[in-house]
Amino acid sequence: MNGKIFVPVICGPTASGKTTLGVNIAQKLEGEIVSADSMQIYTGMEIASAKPSKSEMQGIPHHLMDFLSPSEPFSVADYVELAHKCIQDIHSRGKIPIIVGGTGLYISSVINNITFDDTGSDPDFRFEMKEFAEKNGNEALWQKLNEIDPQSAAKLHPNNLNRVIRALEVYHLSGKKISCVQSQSRLNESPYEPFYLMPDFEREQLYSRINDRVDVMMSKGLLEEAREFFTHSDYATSAQAIGYKELKPFLDGEKPLEECVEKLKQSTRNYAKRQLTWFNKVPQLNRINGNDLTSGIKISEIVKKLVKRYSFLEKNMI
């Protein structure tokens, strides 16, 4: 392994069975799970973030989950710092760290050992950019970035306002394109040997699973969770979680519930599409037929392949 830490990565779109697969592999490899979900970090967002229950965890330790108030700021850099420490700790105890999640930026930043620029911040500039976006639209602000750093702009959706503003802020403060800063950060060698696994479904089947999941979430009390969530006015970042903002028009008496639920299903399907676009670009991505994941035999075959490829895992087999 050339001194690198072996890290299985269970990634993929929402509702694809990542949690179940991760737990099963962790059981067979004596592993522990490091969550890579940008919303499961928050407390009190159990249903909206599809946070696994204790019974679903089946006794497997899950890290970087349910530890932060939704009012607290949290960045990719914060996640990377915590994830590195967590992986090192699991490894030092002779366990296998297994990353499980659907937030591609979190996963790639950790696995590729991305370091983040130490450029400061300019609150007045950020406020000015937000005002510009409110007045002229997110697309117009994105175009500002496209003019100075088309490489970064191409990777960002115009509605990803925080990251567009940050890219502009870095250029404003340092005169450097954030894409150059990021490319320089990739010069640091990764301490990990990843093995990517993605549960794979035909698109229509995945969408059907998403629709069913939303119905289950509603039956579990998602509407009540959203109502409680919106009693707090300081939940800026977490308020972008799919599952709350789509229900707000109903809570505000503006739209019928059925229309909001359909909007939630559509937003979740669109999110899954973006996730697939991200993960399909991952080199050496190992796809697994999602329909096979209900079979313990199939999961055992997957683990055997891992053990065959990485002989040192044999001592971890149960």
Image: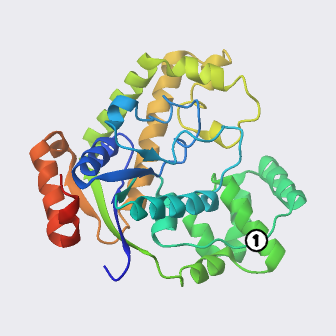
Identify the residue under disc 1. 170
Q: Is residue 249 visible?
A: no
Residue 313's x, y, as percent? 22, 65
Displayed quadrant of residue 315: bottom left
At 27% from the left and 46% from the top, the residue drawn is 21
Q: Farthest residue in the right direction? A: 124
In front: 52, or 62? Answer: 62
In front: 37, or 34? Answer: 34
Q: Is residue 152 above or below residue 137?
A: below
Q: Is residue 58 above or below residue 315?
A: above
Report the side of 108 relative to 194 (left or right): right
At 41% from the left and 46% from the top, the residue drawn is 272
Q: Is residue 273 visible?
A: yes
Q: Is residue 199 above or below residue 212?
A: below
Report the side of 245 relative to 14 (left or right): right
Name the image quarter holding the N terminus.
bottom left
Q: Farthest residue in the front direction? A: 93
Report the side of 203 relative to 123 (left or right): left
**Tag count:** 1
Report the side of 297 relative to 181 (left or right): left
Residue 307's x, y, as percent? 17, 65
Residue 139's x, y, as percent? 68, 56
How dense is the environment of label 1, judged by Cα within 10 Å: few (below 14), some, or many (20 and up)?
A: many
Residue 76's x, y, as percent? 60, 59
Q: Is residue 151 above or below residue 241?
A: below
Residue type, numbered disc 1: Val
Secondary structure of the residue carrying tag 1 is helix
At 48% from the left and 82% from the top, the residue drawn is 189
